[in-house]
Image (tube, rainbow, N blue to C red):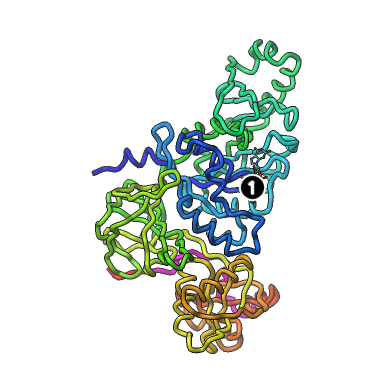
Amino acid sequence: MSNIKEIERRKTFAIISHPDAGKTTLTEKLLLFSGAIQIAGAVKSNKIKKTATSDFLEIEKQRGISVASSVLSFDYKNYKINLLDTPGHKDFAEDTYRTLTAVDSVILVIDCVKGVEEQTEKLMSVCRMRKTPVIVLINKLDREGRDPFELLDEIEEKLSIKVRPLTFPFGIGISFRGVYNMVQNSFSFYKANKQYIEDDVKSFNSIDDPELIKTFGEDAIKLKEDVELVDGVYDTFSRDDYLAGNLAPVFFGSALNNFGIRELLDTFVDIAPNPVSRETTKGIIEPTNEKFSGFVFKIHANIDPKHRDRMAFVRICSGTFERNTYYHHVRLNRDLKFPNPASFLAQSKTLVESAYPGDVIGLYDSDTFKIGDTLTEGETFMFKGIPRFSPEIFRIVMNKDPFKSKQLEKGLRQLTDEGLAQLFIQTDTNRKVIGVVGELQFDVIKYRLLQEFGATVDFTYMNAFKAFWLRYKTEDDIDEIKRLRSNSLYVDKTDEYVFIAESSYALARAQEKNPNVEFLSQVEHNDQTLELGD
Ligand code: G4P
């Protein structure tokens, strides 16, 4: 049975921002607009508080609570919208990068006072790599922010993307009066309003409508000038350019005050892509493909000792997923069925009978999945495009309890399968090195190894700059590295060689001596998976 109708209803996206720009607030307001929740404040309570950076237990507890908000599905205007939540904390940035592989578009929130910030740039570089369509919301217009034209220039420059404002603010901060909608020639009057949804919109025939003067008096001249300037400076909006990831439509608003959100959501459902095709080790898979396929982009473990289960989040890419049906776990070459798959409606988890491309389902898992795993109806391809980045910080694992070596091995394997950290092993010495993005993860790993596996570890400092996956044609190509640089040579979980350079100088030296070897600080899951025997 064709699932085309279901595919055309679906829009799967994520909201990304530098912490504090307003991601959580916007998420909540979108749910409020769609009617999925009734009161403001509900999402907020799930939020990982950034202030508690040192208190990882608190963070983990809140992560636990936030399983249900990992995916928020809601209906709006007959569309089924899947909003994938991304962790706000920068130490969990890799989780966010992986989640971006499971969406078809993003909304980027920028604080009008602060402009483009560090984390915004990093997240956008992942979107650019994947050509993900982006809609921008410039938020907090009720605050004394920067000049809108200056902000637009900064976005174009720092994020290397063309922009096209579709609304434009009139005043800012204390003098903020609202936004002019250039597509509909209407003006939305701003009123601070945190709880309720209320619209105060006036339509005009065009920006030259005499009604504009009647409404705004002399101030109409400034508004008209600004709108004309926008029309003069920026090309007309092209949906094709947006879908190709080359042009970002921009909205202005105040998420906290429910302002500008309706325009954003209406435009989003109009222009955002339906589930798109995806690359596999055996070519492109279209969502309309009759046979079910999907991949694991996130694994969430419960640190509560009473509930040890993990949940693997699967993005459906083609066909229809049915409960209690056997599917093929390609890496393990095993057929599995899932009696209790979960879907996520607004904020509650429910049992799902069938799910379609664009949907995300949660599968209860006991150590069968790792990031990048693919489920199919029997075919033997794996999905590509899930990035693995070099960690930023490296530590050597010291086993404090030799009687628990087996438990330690198992624990390290499971935690790294979840994508919490990366494990590198030096083949000669069996030295184990853990690499992470943020310090906080070492605390999490230490705690979980002890609580869940009974293993006690310490981490000792390691002088390392970055990890590089080695790409080469024959074993001879890495002969020099094996003989003379074995101290820097490790294997990762998939037995691929990784060179951990002490410094950029050490890397340059190794590159110079090994011209037939590529040193990559970023690769993809499954990109080395060649033939998986049929
Ligand atoms: P994040 O998820 O991107 O980290 O940001 P979040 O939504 O938590 O927003 C960060 C802070 O910015 C919050 O204030 C929030 O209320 C505020 N905020 C969001 N949108 C707007 C807006 O349009 N205008 C103004 N003025 N503020 C906005 P907080 O004090 O950190 O938290 P809370 O005490 O309000 O919960």
On-image quarter of the N terminus? top left
Which quadrant of the frame does ligand 1 lie within? top right
What residue is rendered at 37% in x and 68% in y?
366
Q: Where residue 116 sits: x, y (%)?
A: 68, 47
| Magenta extent | 512-529
- Residue 523 lies in magenta, yes or no? yes
Task: Determine which residue is flagged by label 1.
Answer: 160
Residue that appears at 59% across and 72% down: 467
> What residue is rendered at 51% in x and 89% in y?
402
Q: Quadrant of residue 225?
A: top right
Horizontal and vertical percent for residue 306? 43, 66
The residue closer to the viewer here, 194 or 85, is 194
Q: Which three-letter amino acid code belongs to the residue tagged 1?
A: Ser
**In the displayed structure image, the side of residue 377 where residue 55 appears, left or right:** right
Numbered marks: total: 1
Can residue 82 be seen?
no
Residue farthest toward the front in the current orientation of the protein: 306
Taking the image as shown, residue 308 lies to the left or right of residue 211, namely left
Q: Is residue 523 visible?
A: yes
Secondary structure beneath label 1: loop
In the rendered view, would you say 379 is above or below 457? Answer: above
The image position of residue 228, as x and y in percent, is 68, 24
